[in-house]
């Protein structure tokens, strides 16, 4: 008859350490919250107000943007020109792209420091962020504009969390509420709402209000923020996370409603999106995404029966 052998104390200690590490990693990556959201959606019907990101499928995958030496960062849709705009942050440029990811034109950026995001505001008007100095810079772009100089532009500095090296990575604009959403990448990860910039009426006083929503920010189960998109039709905000390989839909109260995974095997992807940097949505609800090293993606909803 064999004796029952007790596990050695060392094995118990190592097992305990491994469990602690797994829990810590899961918490750091927000895996438990993400898993709970995925499970809860199994028995909850999709809200009629939701964009329904899980229904999207990739139509264009990892198309190389030809003609670029520097990596693109951010993306915005111009509903007037029916095109996309992105920026590069080394040899700084603002670049117009067609809806199939081809370069239409390039505009040199002078004095913009470290441009990380660009957002369409109104016809010929955009805001560009300078991550290093936390500046928001309003620019005006004509059809024949060859370069933009920050010294000639209206700009403001937020000056929040200046000690962090993780700055402003995304912009989104609510044209009805006149709100500019500004995403701070992480450490801490935040979304600011800026009202009063850009300034519209020179006859009125220039007052800027900056607020954030700690409850909404704490509920985002992603590790970082790379880009934002505001959907005018639903009033919902889309948050793109590179580290979590996820697009998250937030309702008007900041509650997560749906997700779109950027991992291999999900949404029809053959390979995981390597480093998602920018997201945009057109008038038909199609999603466009850029990823380093200069890869272009399009996601669309299948026709509803």
Image (cartoon, helix red, strand yellow):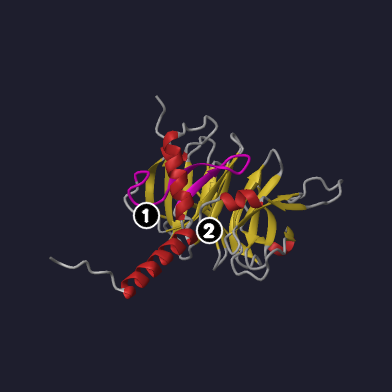
Asked if residue 48 is among those painted magenta in the image, a careful observer would answer no
Point out the stretch of residues depicted in magenta. 246-268
Instruction: Name which residue lies at 60% across and 52% down.
Output: 217
In the rendered image, the residue lying farthest to the bottom is: 10
Circle 2 SS class: loop
Residue for badge 2: 224
Q: Which of the 4 image quarters holds residue 93?
A: bottom right
**Residue at 40 percent of width and 29 percent of height:** 303
Q: Residue furthest top?
A: 305
Q: Are marks 1 and 2 in contact (CB under 8 Å)?
A: no
Above or below residue 87? Residue 9 is below
Image coords of residue 262 (percent x, y): 41, 50
Q: Which mark is residue 191?
A: none
- SS type, badge 1: loop
The spot of residue 298 in percent (x, y) is 43, 45
Q: Is residue 292 left or right of residue 141?
A: left
Q: Of 100 and 198, which appears nearest the observer?
A: 198
For label 1, count other residues whose C-alpha is less than 10 Å away and answer few (under 14), some (14-19) or many (20+). some
Nearer to me, 125 or 268: 268
Q: Kindly report the distance in space between the C-alpha atoms of the residues bearing marks 1 and 2.
A: 17 Å
**Relative horizontal placement of residue 255, taking residue 203 as reference (left or right):** left
Residue 108 lies left or right of residue 258; in this view the side is right
Q: Position of residue 260 (x, y in %)?
A: 44, 45
Residue 160 placement (x, y as % from top left): 70, 63
């Amino acid at each position: 008859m064999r004796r029952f052998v007790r596990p050695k104390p060392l094995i118990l200690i190592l097992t305990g350490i491994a469990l602690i590490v797994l829990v810590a990693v899961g918490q750091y990556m927000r895996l438990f919250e993400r898993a709970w959201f995925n499970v809860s959606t199994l028995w909850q019907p999709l809200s009629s107000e939701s964009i329904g990101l899980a229904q999207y499928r990739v139509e264009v995958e990892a198309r190389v943007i030809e003609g670029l030496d520097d990596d693109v960062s951010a993306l915005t849709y111009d509903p007037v020109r029916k095109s996309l705009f992105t920026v590069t942050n080394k040899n700084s440029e603002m670049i117009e792209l067609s809806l199939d990811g081809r370069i239409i034109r390039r505009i040199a950026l002078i004095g913009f420091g470290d441009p990380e995001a660009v957002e369409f505001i109104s016809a010929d008007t955009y805001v560009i962020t300078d991550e290093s100095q936390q500046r928001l810079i309003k620019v005006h772009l004509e059809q024949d504009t060859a370069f933009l100089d920050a010294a000639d532009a209206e700009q403001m500095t937020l000056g929040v969390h200046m000690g962090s090296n993780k700055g402003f990575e995304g912009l989104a604009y609510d044209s009805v509420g006149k709100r500019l959403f500004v995403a701070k990448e992480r450490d801490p990860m935040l979304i600011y709402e800026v009202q009063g910039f850009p300034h519209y009426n020179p006859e009125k006083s220039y007052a800027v209000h900056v607020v954030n929503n700690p409850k909404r920010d704490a509920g985002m189960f992603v590790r970082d923020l790379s880009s934002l998109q505001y959907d005018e039709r639903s009033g919902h905000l889309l948050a793109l996370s590179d580290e979590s390989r996820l697009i998250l839909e937030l309702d008007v109260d900041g509650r997560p409603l749906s997700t779109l995974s950027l991992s291999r095997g999900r949404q029809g992807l053959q390979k995981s999106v390597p480093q998602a940097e920018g997201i945009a949505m057109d008038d038909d609800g199609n999603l466009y995404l850029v990823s380093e090293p200069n890869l272009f993606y399009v996601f669309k909803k299948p026709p509803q029966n």
